[in-house]
Amino acid sequence: MINSYKEDEKSVDKPKIVTIARLLKYLFEYKGRIFIVLLLMGFGTCVQLINPLFFEAAVDKYIMPKDLHGFIRLIILAAVLNLGLVLAIKLRMLLMAKTSNQVILKIREQLYTHIQTLDLNFFDSRPIGKILARITGDVNSLRDIMENCVTTLIPELITVIAVGVIMFTKNWRLALASLFSLPPMMLGIWIISKKSHNYWQVFRKKQSNMSAFVNEDFSGIKIVHSFNAQKETNATFRSIIGEYRGAFVKAVRWSDAYWSVIDLCWSLGTMAMYYVGIKVIGVTDVSIGTYIAFGTYIGMFWQPIMNLSQFYNQLVTTVSGAERVFEILDTKAKLVDKENAVEMPQIKGNVKFDNVTFSYTGKENVLENVNFDIVAGKTVALVGPTGAGKSTIVNLISRFYDVNEGAVLIDGYDIRNVTIKSLRTQMGVMTQDNFIFSGTIKDNIRYGKLDATEEEIIAAAKVVHAHEFIEKMEKGYDTELTSRGGELSKGQGQLVAFARTMLSDPRILILDEATSSIDTKTEQLIQKGIAALLKGRTSFVIAHRLSTIQNADIIFVVDEKNILEAGTHEELLAKKGKYWKLVEDAKA
């Protein structure tokens, strides 16, 4: 199914605990550092739990009896411990920030590397902007949740349990009164979390839609300007951003409901404690220090509850991002090497289609029962109307897709039985829209052979007559290019891409409308270079220009899901069939 910026992606719901456990696996690869963080948090929690006891002791044992020296000693002890607490918190934050950043880097690298292994079906089915949203926004959303899993979840849970134990130990009736509102609070949070998670999932989808639209719009900005379509694209963007804002507002409203529930329950618990203390137990039966300690402990109990709820809110907010990241990591490439795949030997160039049928969607066939057998070293031209299946044939030879029925054989090897890398490293593919990467011209050409020397790069450029215009540029081969080569004309960009393909020294060469952006004069200049490259190599050429087609050893007329005519230029003209009509139409 093809997705666009107009459609929300489908969600893959998994229990939150499964997603969190998977994230924690990344954290616990840094066991030593996490152990130090836990020790620091243990120390900090102990100091925080002791602090209310300092207040109680100060009032009951030193201030009321007027023991100044004991009071000073207590203050010094409390100050030293709390100074250590501050230092422990700073060190803990530093260690967790470093660890979480390293984990985020690892997840992003894993995600990018995994996406690189996925076949073209994955990229055909969704906009690039939605893929970028996973690598950037969704991965970034994991940082806080990983830090807080250790720095919030563990210490705050320990604090809540320890404070509860201390409160029940000191006075169980005051403790019960203080915590009577806990069950309704937990029920309220559970209801809110269910709604909140759903709305944050919707928000992530709307965020992806926005990213997809912006990427698509800016990629085609020349078309937008040429047709003066800014007003229309602005209207579309406002509509998308409106859905994005609406989803965000709904998600935030439900998330903010956490605090109202907790504040209410906190206030009710505090009032209940004082009511029970005064009306039920009696003022004289509980010391002032105990009341002060209990008041502090109530704060120490509910503040961690508040922090845990904030963490849970954050968890609900970001776990949808984690689910989207892991969904991509769990996506398996449909086109992979078989377990017993062998290395493709050096290709001679015999190419055979044996009763090949293929469909992109699994519904309508693009090719049906296609058969041909090409001898090594021959040049094959593919002609026919748009959408007839010419590019599909060359895509199947490169094994960008697998056939549904039949087989594609190179030198007698079914290409599904050889490793993809050993096949594609011996093939050169050049299309009409060859991508120019940011970097120097030299870097772009070297992409065809990463260990190529400067002499090899220049030699390849000379073959396709790119050397002449490159040398005229101010920095020559070291000229910096932006993404898509905006500094070059369309024809110059094609020549750089041509040199890149030449440098790869392919055994089978595929030219898919490769010279359509080059003017006739430039095309004439590179014909000799192409002829030299094609000598002794099998090549498949898709072109509309008669000059490119007529010198081919064999021409295939592709239409109606098959090859309708096959022969040389002269043979097909003599038949006065489909090819003859195409030539006549071109002349007209």
Image (tube, rainbow, N blue to C red):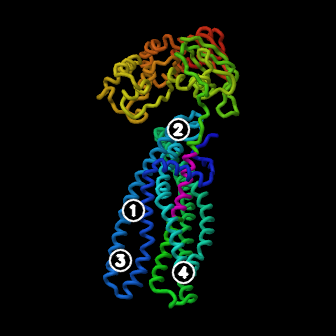
Residue 114, labelled with which disc? Answer: 2
Residue 89, labelled with which disc? Answer: 1
Give coordinates of residue 570: x percent, y percent.
Answer: 59, 8
Q: Residues within 10 Å of mark 3 (few under 14, many from 20)?
A: some
Asked if disc 2 and disc 3 are in contact, CB closer than 8 Å, the reply is: no
Asked if disc 3 and disc 1 are in contact, CB closer than 8 Å, the reply is: no
Q: If you read the primary sequence from the N terminus, does the residue marked by circle 2 or circle 1 appear first? A: 1
In this orientation, which residue lies closer to the viewer: 370 or 388? Answer: 370
Report helix, strand or loop for mark 2: helix
Asked if disc 4 and disc 2 are in contact, CB closer than 8 Å, the reply is: no
Q: Which residues are magenta?
A: 310-326
Reading the image, the residue beneath label 3 is 74
Q: If you read the primary sequence from the N terminus, does the residue marked by circle 2 or circle 3 appear first? A: 3
Query: Mark 2 belongs to which amino acid?
Result: His
Reading the image, the residue beneath label 4 is 171
Q: Residues within 10 Å of mark 2 (few under 14, many from 20)?
A: some
In this orientation, which residue lies closer to the viewer: 91 or 285? Answer: 285
Report helix, strand or loop for mark 3: helix
Quadrant occupied by the N terminus = top right
Asked if disc 4 and disc 3 are in contact, CB closer than 8 Å, the reply is: no
